[in-house]
Image (spheres, rainbow, N blue to C red):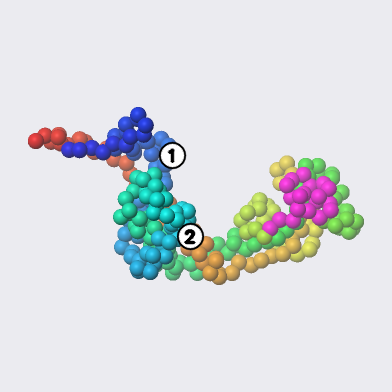
Amino acid sequence: MNHQVLQIGSQIIPSENLLSLLRNHLMFPQFVRELIIDQAIADYTCTLEEENQAKTQFLQQNQINSEEKLHAWLKQNSLEIEQLPQISTKGIKLEKFKTAQFTHQIQSYFLTRKAQLDRIIYSLIRVTDGGIAQELYFRLLEGEQPFAEVAKAYSEGAEAQTGGLIGPVELSVPHPAIAQRLRVAQPGKIESPLRIQEWWVILRLEKFIPAQLDQIMEKKLLNELFLTWLNQEVEEKVSIQTIPDDPCEGQN
């Protein structure tokens, strides 16, 4: 029986060693994910128009604008021209799979995720000295200086460069203690100094932006549901087994 080998310079790598190499170079999880995706989309098809659009987009993304560049790209990736349609349409088939499998879950999933998907714009000042934090807080309450000026002058984090302004960001992004305080805060109100680890933080909610289930949000949630499914598939269905050699292999 003939065996394929991979040659890189003077190094000969038998096909039976590729699995261990994928694992050693931390490429095995991505390899497995791609195989699971291939299995999931195997029954999905594309129209001729979709195939042509996918090919055009694929060539543009890879900056392939001539036959010479196409053949060079195929050679570089050890592919044949016949494999190009399968590769270029994979994204379209995957989107069809996501839509068919997870669209019916989006509404309920959105409701469970909404508390983290709401967005906020807020201002922040952080210092390591609690006494300074109290002094700045009272100065802000009295209106002696605008919040942005105080942040630029005293805040010890990167937010000083923006006058303390942060956002819009989802409520899942800030530290949980900050998110909890801002979730119930009144816009424009200076919050009393909050101790978070080594920092004293002064907050002001600028704007609360409730999450809406629009097309952008649907796409985001569809991808989240897909990734959750994919991770479960990897965890539950992938195993590595050792199969004994066939004693008859190689005999005439």
Q: Which residue is mark 1?
A: 26
Q: Position of residue 96 (x, y in %)?
A: 40, 65
Point out the image quarter for the N terminus. Answer: top left
Q: Is residue 51 above or below residue 29?
A: below
Residue type at the position of mark 1: Leu
Q: Nearer the viewer, residue 50 or 72?
A: 72
Residue beneath the point at 48% across and 63% down: 222
Residue beneath the point at 35% across and 51% down: 35
Point out the image quarter for the C terminus. Answer: top left
User: Looking at this rendering, what residue extends furthest in the top direction?
Assistant: 10
* Residue 236 visible from this viewpoint: no
Please name the predominant secondary structure of the magenta segment in the image. Answer: helix
Q: How many marks?
A: 2
Residue beneath the point at 20% across and 38% down: 2
Residue beneath the point at 55% across and 66% down: 216
Q: Is residue 21 above or below residue 90?
A: above
Q: Are marks 1 and 2 in contact (CB under 8 Å)?
A: no
Which numbered dot is residue 223?
A: 2
